[in-house]
Amino acid sequence: MILVVFISCKTVKETKDEEQTRPNVVIIYADDMGYGDLNCQNPNSKIPTPYLDKLASEGMRFTDAHSSSGICSPSRFALLTGTYHWRNQHEIVKSFGKPFFKETDITLPQVLKTAGYTTACIGKWHLGLDWEFKNPPSLKRKKGRRIIDVYQSHDIDWSKPVKGGPLDRGFDYYFGDGTINFPPYAWMENERFIEAPTEEMSSKNTCITKEGKCEFRAGPKLKDWDPYKVLPTLTTTTVGWINNYDKKEPFFLYFALPSPHAPIIPNDEFEGKSEAGAYGDFMVQTDWVVGQVLNALKEKGLEDNTIVIFSSDNGPEKYAFKRAEKFDHFSMGDFRGLKRDIWEGGHHVPFIVKWPKQIKAGTVSNEVISQVDIMATISSITKTALPKTAGPDSYDFSSILKGKKIKGPLREATVQNTFEDKWALRKGKWLYMNTSDVSHFKVPEFYTKLKNYTDFKTKGLLFDLEADPEQRVNLYSKYPQQVEQMRKLLSTYRTQGYSVKN
């Protein structure tokens, strides 16, 4: 999941005791992990996830949580800003792309820094940087019917700091590889690359994956770059950062995993640990990584005063169909659709929060929440004032975490969107979509028959998710007034610049 902007200070000065009791905040953000990949919420799962199951047993698991988008960069932006991604753009940040942010966007780490938090981002960024180019892309490459420009190592000025990244968005420290299947294939610390790439990754580069394709984009790489070392290196760095933390003020740590996103590359010690093939083994490793972070917090004596939030940026990749057929494991759970879709499976994600002595262990909430809500919630918990322009789509669900009863649903409605022409609005039990052309990829015939899915021909779609969570019964023609009401509300949200109901 994170612009230098003015953020007003708190009007009430906290005492030193209050500052010291503010909780640390750790967000662990998985990549392309489906709702059904967690054993604790899929009784038929073929993947053991003991650490995530334990996290859920010690905290609160949300059964109706959503990412902002069905793809990567947009959801990460939304999580870090409390702003729906589509207020800026819809697409992912391409290789060597500009930052996703506007200069006026305010991030969670920026807000927490005003309260004295130390902030760190480790792992996948994928939200763009202000690159220093020596010259335009020097390579042209054919991709299908298109000719695309490709930057090579000699096109980049590696000697200069790379601005516009985590440190300019409120983080004190950054370490990562940017994006595991995007160039440059090298390690970045803060605003500089530790070693400058001198070779090139291309579609002709061979790699050994345990499942599927390499999926590497062409571009600069280190001579001995090994993707199998990425997840272990990020894990060691994160655990080390926690172990070495010796400051008195609380911290915010955003650990953005590159897994279980393709390339599917579980390390050898995890091979055969699941009954869902190499992807399942990669999930087991991802679960183990979460466990290492949780263990580090405990061993450091930080567990009791740390909020841990675990979620994923979107639903599972299209390989999930083959996985269902071959291994009888459904990464999307019982939901329809996958990554990129506005079907539930594209954005209905795992979401677990642990906060010892504050959240009752083993609780399950059916409240509809979105990752954009993290901004307002953490601000409320840490007693940190949000500037008026921050988090325009972020609702505070801290009362739910503390077990308090609320009147009616938390959110008036929730927008789901991936591509600019396809929109969905969730309001209570109702889900409206502005089109019936929803699936990004053609659903295999075996899967359509297995799930008893049918195609719809109406102008839009309407579902009652309480009665029909798998989205089989289209009520668009039956309830035209409900459709029109939701269409108008969606239009209002899109035009007025905010969606939080005051």
Image (cartoon, grey):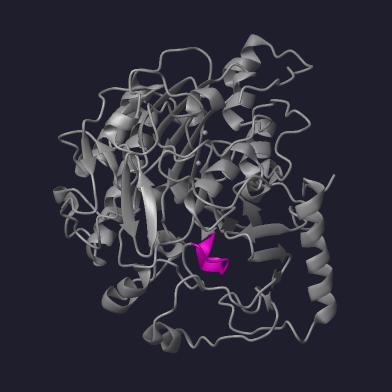
- Check the image and report above or below for 367 versus 372: below
Most foreground residue, 137 or 67: 137
Give the image location of residue 295, x and y in percent.
34, 34
Q: Is residue 62 left or right of residue 258?
A: right
- Check the image and report above or below for 455 versus 340: below
Give the image location of residue 344, x and y in percent.
56, 67
Asked if residue 106 can be seen in this view, the reply is yes
Most foreground residue, 115 or 175: 175
Q: Residue at x 67, y 65 (%)?
A: 424
Give the image location of residue 141, x and y in percent.
31, 52
**Which residues are the magenta region?**
340-347
- Check the image and report above or below for 416 versus 233: below
Q: Is residue 386 left or right of residue 142?
A: right
Q: Residue at x 44, y 46 (%)?
A: 94
Q: Residue at x 54, y 23 (%)?
A: 168
Asked if residue 170 can be seen in this view, the reply is no
Q: Is residue 41 left or right of residue 430?
A: left
User: Which corner quadrant of the image does residue 423 belong to?
Assistant: bottom right
Residue 218 highlighted magenta (yes or no)? no
Give the prevailing secondary structure in the magenta stretch: loop
Give the image location of residue 446, x and y in percent.
37, 86
Q: So how many labels did they put on this image? A: 0
Q: Quadrant of the C terminus?
A: top right
User: Which corner quadrant of the image does residue 110 belong to?
Assistant: top right
User: Which corner quadrant of the image does residue 431 belong to?
Assistant: bottom right
